[in-house]
Amino acid sequence: WRTKFRKQMHAADNQIGFKAVDTLINYETVKYFNNEGFEVKNYEKLLKAYEKGALKTQTSLSLLNSGQQVIITAGLTASMALATSQILAGQLSIGDLVMVNLLILQVSQPLNFLGSVYRDIQQSHTDMRSLNTPRTLR
């Protein structure tokens, strides 16, 4: 679901590059017709579109990471509460509580790492697809 935001960001970045190159190539024409203000406004509009895409990408990543942390924290809290109630009932020892805590943390750490690797692979795939698409000038 985050890939579409990344694609929007790349599209805006490509438009910025096209506009900058086009403006620099046609520098004399822009100066001759006194269109610097027009070109600046167009460039600023493209920069705002890129900023919007980058903000969506970062916001969705932050939301995803926050959701993952809430789920891990809720699971850890529930398991600690359950283990604590069993300690009070005399069925578990303090060492068992530590074991449950470490077990939950050791299970969640590799999953978090795998999620980061998966996200990086997805972003790289999107970046490479964007790089390999043929460029068309308007």
Image (cartoon, helix red, strand yellow):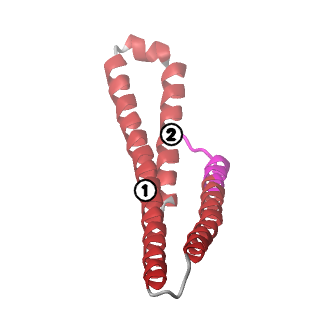
Q: Is residue 133 magenta?
A: yes
Q: Is residue 30 magenta?
A: no
Instruction: Give the Cα distance between marks 2 and 1.
Output: 19 Å
Q: Residue type at mark 2? A: Asp
Front residue (pair 75, 17) = 75
Residue bounds of the magenta highlight = 124-138
Mark 1: secondary structure: helix
Q: Residue type at mark 1? A: Ser
Residue 104 as seen in the image, left or right of residue 47 = right
| Residue bearing mark 2 | 13
Observer-side mark, 2 or 1, equals 1
Q: What secondary structure do most residues of the magenta stretch adopt?
A: helix
Measuring 47% from the left and 74% from the top, which residue is drawn there? 80
Residue 19, placed above or below residue 111: above
Front residue (pair 58, 68) = 68
Q: Is residue 138 visible?
A: no
| Residue bearing mark 1 | 60
Q: How many marks?
A: 2
Q: Position of residue 75 (x, y in %)?
A: 47, 74
Q: Residues within 10 Å of mark 2 (few under 14, many from 20)?
A: some
Residue 27 as seen in the image, left or right of residue 34 = right
Q: Position of residue 64 (x, y in %)?
A: 46, 61
Mark 2: secondary structure: helix
Measuring 46% from the left and 42% from the top, which residue is drawn there? 12
Residue 97, placed above or below residue 27: below
Q: Is residue 55 visible?
A: yes
Residue 31 as seen in the image, left or right of residue 126 = left
Q: Residues within 10 Å of mark 1 (few under 14, many from 20)?
A: some
